[in-house]
Each structure stands twice: as structure tokens, then as C-alpha cells.
């Protein structure tokens, strides 16, 4: 084997299918056997929010500071 993380062959859908077939097996047991994190079952889908709006005055001022101090980092500016 080479270095690097191994991919888990099972996912949240597999846990749901096993639990639908065997109702007497708990979610915790199923996840432990299939080596799937329980948190993976309850993730909410993320939707991209609105694009951030830029304040033109701040952007202009930052461009000037970047020209004046080219070696300063973004946090300092």
C-alpha cells in the first residue's frame, strides 16, 4: 500500500439502505460496522448565498495601500 488515506467504500446511502432492510439494527451499530461517521447521515445541503457586495471606497483605498506597501500582508492592510 502507498501512503494516503484509504477511501471508505460505504456512504450515508448505504447506512440508510441497511437500516431500511433490518429495522432492529440501530443507526450507531450500522455506522460502526460500515465505518461511516454518524455525522455524515445528518448533513444539511449547503446552498450558496448571495455574492458579497464590495464597497468601492474601501476597494480603492486598499488598492492605494497595496501600491504604497507592496510587501505588507492582507491582514496588515
Image (cartoon, rainbow, N blue to C red):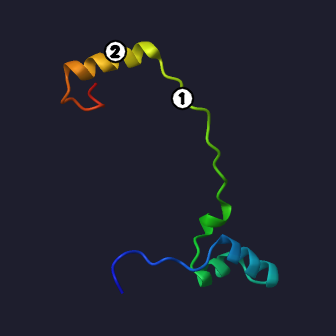
Q: Quadrant of residue 49?
A: top right
Give SS at disc 1.
loop
The picture places residue 19, in percent across and down from the top left corner, at 76, 79
Above or below, comparing residue 75 to residue 47 in the picture: above
Provide residue 36's location: percent of width, then percent of height: 59, 75
Q: Residue at x 72, y 79 (%)?
A: 26
Q: Label 1 neighbourhood size at 10 Å, few (<14), some (14-19), many (20+)?
A: few
Question: SS class of the residue under badge 2?
Answer: helix
> Is 45 displayed left or right of 4 in the figure?
right
Q: Of marks 1 and 2, which one's residue comes earlier in the chain?
A: 1
The image quadrant that residue 69 belongs to is top left
Residue annotated with mark 2: 61
**x 42%, y 12%: residue:** 57
The image position of residue 29, as x and y in percent, is 65, 81
Q: Quadrant of the C terminus?
A: top left
The residue labelled by disc 1 is 52
Relative height, residue 22 to residue 51 (above, below): below
Quarter of the rendering occupied by the N terminus: bottom left
Q: Is residue 68 above or below residue 44?
A: above
Q: Is residue 6 above or below residue 42?
A: below
Amino acid at each position: 500500500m502507498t501512503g494516503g488515506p484509504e477511501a471508505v467504500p460505504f456512504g450515508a446511502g448505504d447506512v440508510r439502505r441497511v437500516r431500511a432492510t433490518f429495522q432492529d439494527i440501530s443507526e450507531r451499530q450500522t455506522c460502526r460496522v460500515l465505518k461511516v461517521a454518524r455525522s455524515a447521515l445528518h448533513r444539511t445541503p449547503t446552498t450558496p448565498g448571495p455574492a458579497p457586495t464590495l464597497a468601492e471606497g474601501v476597494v480603492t483605498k486598499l488598492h492605494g495601500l497595496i501600491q504604497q506597501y507592496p510587501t505588507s500582508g492582507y491582514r496588515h492592510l
